[in-house]
């Protein structure tokens, strides 16, 4: 694919957005950073646009002129359905409608491992694994994945559906020795996605090269993405700081860990 003219990053004020938002100047002439929350981009080169993803007209304006989108914006944990509905269901619909009407940019959709959270840690999953969401948040990410597939099949819009594991500076507990994605590996994934000559609409597991990983990306090897980090180097410190989960602990039973025991919030 040609270098991007303008890359939009939604959710730029969030934990992941803030860590990576100024690392894509080399793949796009312009970077547009957006969030519903205020933030200081700390980058005079970047455009910043405040936008609520639930606002159809505002999202149309946000996407206009962009030929790439890294879609990080939305509710990122289990929450009330009313909030998930606005940000993750209406927000995704608005984004794809804006993409359809504004030149069909290539999209990286930040899906989540909570789409498959009710699989056992003994399961080894590739990108054809059965969907087993572990909450309404996971259900909303399944909606996003299905919307991406629809707009690819019907309108040719390409999306990398990235089921992110746990993207933080370091793994925080034993489960993340399997699910951790380093910020550097996320950045290199974004670069691979926007440099690939042909993307299609694949599901990709957003996970570093962890010895203890549960997920298999062999079906997307054509992208040439090779994560470099491995949570194993944190094992000693993680095991020292977090207790071994008991047999009935959700972290021992399910890949989604404690998300599987979240209530339906009212
Ligand atoms: P975060 O919660 O820190 O950031 C999400 C951002 O989206 C926030 O800045 C928030 O203001 C913004 N946002 C929420 N509702 C919005 C709306 N209606 N309109 C516009 N912006 C809105 O989450 P984080 O960790 O940065 O994750 C980024 C994305 O990656 C999220 O979509 C999350 O679901 C996904 N993800 C992250 C993982 C991780 O380990 N960090 C794991 C799996 C998925
Ligand atoms: C997610 O989907 C969340 O956005 C993130 O905050 C983490 O909880 C992550 O999953 C995880 O499973 O560790």
Image (cartoon, rainbow, N blue to C red):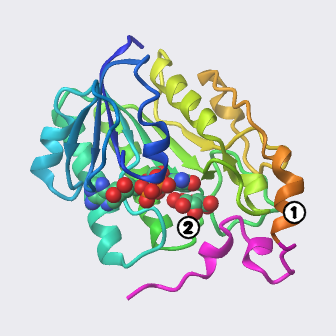
What is the quadrant of residue 175 in the picture? bottom right
Q: What x and y, as percent, mark residue 124?
A: 78, 52
Instruction: Look at the image and tell me in which quarter the N terminus lies.
Output: top left
State the residue lying farthest toward the left.
Answer: 57
Circle 2 residues within 10 Å: few <14, some 14–19, many ≥20: many
What is the quadrant of residue 105 in the picture? top left
What is the quadrant of residue 89 in the picture? bottom left
Mark nearest the camera among 1 and 2 is: 1
Q: Note whether residue 30 is visible.
A: yes
Position of 33 relative to 120 (above/below): above
- Residue at the disc numbered 1: 239
Q: Main secondary structure of the magenta part?
A: loop
Q: Is residue 237 magenta?
A: no
Q: What x and y, as percent, mark residue 107?
A: 38, 35
Q: Depth check: 215 or 186 in front?
A: 186
Q: What x and y, as percent, mark residue 226?
A: 69, 26
Q: Residue at x 36, y 45 (%)?
A: 12
**Is ligand 2 less than 8 Å from the beta carbon at label 2?**
no
**What label does residue 133 carry, if any?**
2
Which span is picked out in magenta?
A: 243-266
Q: What x and y, as percent, mark residue 87?
A: 30, 61
Point out the tag, 1 or 2, that comes first from the N-terminus.
2
């Amino acid at each position: 694919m040609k270098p991007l003219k303008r890359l939009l990053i939604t959710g730029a004020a969030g934990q992941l957005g803030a860590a990576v938002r100024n690392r894509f100047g080399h793949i796009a002439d312009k970077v547009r950073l957006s969030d519903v929350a205020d933030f200081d981009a700390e980058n005079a080169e970047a455009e910043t646009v405040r936008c609520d993803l639930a606002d159809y007209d505002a999202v149309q304006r946000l996407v206009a002129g962009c030929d790439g989108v890294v879609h990080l914006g939305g509710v990122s944990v289990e929450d009330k359905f009313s909030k998930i509905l606005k940000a993750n269901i209406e927000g995704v619909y608005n984004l794809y409608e804006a993409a359809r009407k504004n030149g069909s940019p290539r999209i990286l959709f930040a899906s989540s491992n909570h789409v498959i959270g009710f699989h056992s840690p003994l399961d080894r999953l590739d990108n054809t694994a059965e969907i087993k969401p572990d909450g309404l948040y996971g259900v909303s990410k399944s909606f996003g994945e299905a919307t991406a597939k629809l707009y690819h099949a019907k309108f040719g819009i390409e999306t990398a559906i990235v089921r992110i594991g746990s993207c933080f500076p370091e793994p925080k507990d034993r489960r993340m020795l399997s699910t951790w994605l380093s910020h550097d590996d996320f950045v290199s994934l974004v670069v691979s996605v926007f440099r690939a000559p042909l993307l299609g609409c694949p599901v990709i597991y957003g996970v570093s090269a962890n010895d203890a990983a549960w997920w298999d990306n062999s079906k997307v090897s054509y992208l040439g993405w090779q994560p470099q980090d491995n949570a194993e180097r944190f094992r000693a410190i993680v095991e020292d700081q977090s207790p071994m989960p008991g047999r009935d602990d959700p972290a021992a039973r399910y890949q989604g860990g404690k998300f599987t025991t979240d209530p339906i919030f009212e």
